[in-house]
Image (tube, coloured by chain):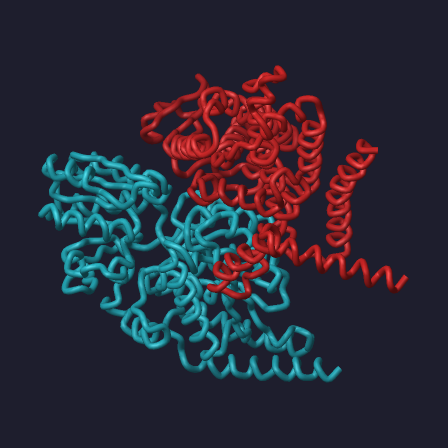
Chain colours: A cyan, B red
Amino acid sequence: MKKRFMSAGMAAVVAMASLTACGGSASTETTAAADAKAETSAEAGESSAEAGSAEGGTLKIGVIGPLTGAAASYGIAVQNGADLAVKEINEAGGINGMKVELKAEDDENDPEKSVNAYNTLKDWGMQMLVGTTTSKPCIAVGAESASDNMFQITPSGSAVECVSNPNVFRVCFADPDQGTASAQYIGEHQLATKVAIIYDSSTEYSSGIRESFVKEAANQGIEIVADEAFTADSNTDFSVQLDKAKDAGAELVFLPIYYQEASVILKQAADKEFAPTFFGCDGMDGILTVENFDKSLAEGLMLLTPFSTTEEGSEEFTKSYTDAYGVEPIQFAADSYDAVYAIKAAAEKAGITADMSVSDMCDAMETAMTEITIQGLTGADMSWNANGEPNKAPKAAKIVDGIYEMEK
Amino acid sequence: MKKNKLLIQNSITYAIIIGCWILVQILASTGHMTSLMKGLLVPLCIYVIMAVSLNLTVGILGELSLGHAGFMCLGAFSGAFFTNCMANVIPSVQVRFFFALLIGALVAGVFGILIGIPVLRLRGDYLAIVTLAFGEIIKNLLNAIYVGMDQSGFHFSFKDTTSLGMDDTGVVIIKGAQGITGTPKAATFTIGIILVLLTLFVVLNLINSRSGRAIMAIRDNRIAAESVGINITKFKLMAFSISASLAGVAGVLYGHNLSSLAATPKNFGYNQSIMILVFVVLGGLGNIRGSIIAAVVLTMLPELLRGLNDYRMLIYAIVLIVMMIFNSSPKAIEMRSVFMDKIKKNRKEAA
């Protein structure tokens, strides 16, 4: 009995806090969402106070990503980005008066482990999922969350199939879109006409981007002079591929790969005194954090990334992120930060309350996601279509003096 | 007398499996099962089948094989390929899954024979290295191949999907490194348990048959076995291909448990083969029940240690070392027998 009074009291306090928080405005939401919030949070406050058993109103959000292993840099960034967003939201009064609770689980970038991580989070009481960070696990977890009808938004699962289920949305671009956007960017800015590609044929991320790049390159008048593959088992020596690119007279080398291998390629290219423009996609993000990597090698490297720490509008995020976690944020952190704010905006639009069932929540969120527009770190006026794909403009950055500089 | 003892031992093994199934059903129906455990049930069956089938090669035939995950990979891909191609022809997922299991077993078994013919002439370390290479070849081939299907039939390519040259009705089934996505989740715990029982039935009956005794004779003394007229090649091939096709069955189960199937170093690489070998060695070479228990314990352990975050890999490794020492170090065995004697003595005194 005592407990019930306590929780009712807590719910009331939380509701009060959220109402007062409405006065001050949070920067990432539209006015429409803010209006909706004032109404729904009042309702939520009432209903939870009446019910009394609404657990004080907490929304449990799970995060899945590789926190150990070769892709750990992505998973940790996603975890931190979501954590920061949740902290801010809680300080500002939560979502519809609900406090947000976050828990991250490691999947080692393995689909099988990822499903285990998902189930672990379900045992914890997860109501929505921010994840997974990498593509293959995301497809496997997407099938699980679809059968549970749990709302899922992946910050960085870029394979086409990641959002094939109606309950899954994503913040980043799909792989083919990145390849097409890269080719268009190179073509429109006339960066080069002779392009070499070095890609990892054993990841779908890399081969997916390459395929759409090759398709679009023909339209942009780009000649592909070398098209060289490597696999996860042969990712330590790239001299053959680089020699071929050099001999073919490539002006630009397109690297749709992850930063770990890219750092080796940059080093080996420098040893060969081969200095074309290097151009990467979002997997290149993180190259400046590689240990024992001479950052001067990355000078002039261009990458298609929706986020830069020095960009206008992201200074505040960068500062609080660096203060909290001791490292500069990468794009993955910004993606998951946006993902949490997208959840907030959609949850407010849909009037989500903590005592709703996971499945009801998901249905309401699916509709609300297509109606919101948020001002995110990774793009202005981000909106989503019913397929779960985001709608935002691609941006490219160049590394100058060891930092990203946004290209116009 | 001997026969009876054997029967009792085998019955205990079957009873353990059936007991586990009943226990799980009771726990699940009363709602005492966590989602994590529910999700782990099918993988547990997969690894039990893998461990038992590898024990046939390593423990009973006495040849070290490091390519077991390669056969699993073949089974997984052929099974999932079949299920996806036949989506329009056979609407029932369960029926397709049943045929996929047969096809997976067949494909892995045929490859087992093909690989076995040249490879089984080698012995010891050489065999181990060749099987390791074979596993890697399978994994890399499947990473590179693109297969599509349209009205006119199948199209293959080693380059990319556009060079498949399909018409508008074409669907890409195996998409290079992306593997096969969208396989329906047909694997259930009950099917898994039935397959485990089937595997046990095959392996235990083989061991206790005329052929099984011939296989063990080859393991214990090849020259003596040859001198009494045992056809070495035939029996070696038999054990090796049965082991391979059972691994294929485990693979099909794996392919129908996750909706994304891709040959990564993690699931079908040599690390996985070694992992399965660890199950077998920890459970005891030739000890089928030991393999089952070791596979279950070592599959669950990393998940149960999730709470320790970054330390879990370290703890896992330490637990592995401790268990190996406890199980097989001569001193540890001595200590255990002394301890057991003491308990027996106490019990006698009490009685």
Q: In terms of image quadrants, where is residue B157?
A: top left
**Residue B208 image point, x, y percent:** 72, 28
Please count the marks in the image: 0
Q: Is residue B197 visible?
A: yes
- In this rendering, would A260 be left or right of B323? left
**Residue A220 image point, x, y percent:** 18, 38
Which quarter of the image is occupied by the C terminus of chain A? Answer: bottom left
**Residue B258 image point, x, y percent:** 54, 43
* Residue A39 vertical placement versus A148 (above, below): below
**Residue A319 image point, x, y percent:** 30, 75
Q: Residue at x 60, y 68 (%)?
A: A354
Q: Residue at x 25, y 55 (%)?
A: A395
- In this rendering, would A28 be left or right of B215? left
Q: Residue furthest top?
A: B229
Q: Nearer the viewer, residue A317 or A13?
A: A317
Q: Residue at x 68, y 29 (%)?
A: B207
* Residue B134 vertical placement versus B228 (above, below): below
Q: Nearer the viewer, residue A223 or A120?
A: A120
- In this rendering, would A361 be left or right of B349? left
Q: In terms of image quadrants, where is residue A356?
A: bottom right
Q: Residue furthest right?
A: B351
Q: Is residue B173 visible?
A: no
Q: In terms of image quadrants, where is residue A254?
A: top left
Q: Nearer the viewer, residue B48 or B164?
A: B48
- In this rendering, would B298 be left or right of A398? right
Which quarter of the image is occupied by the N terminus of chain A? Answer: bottom right
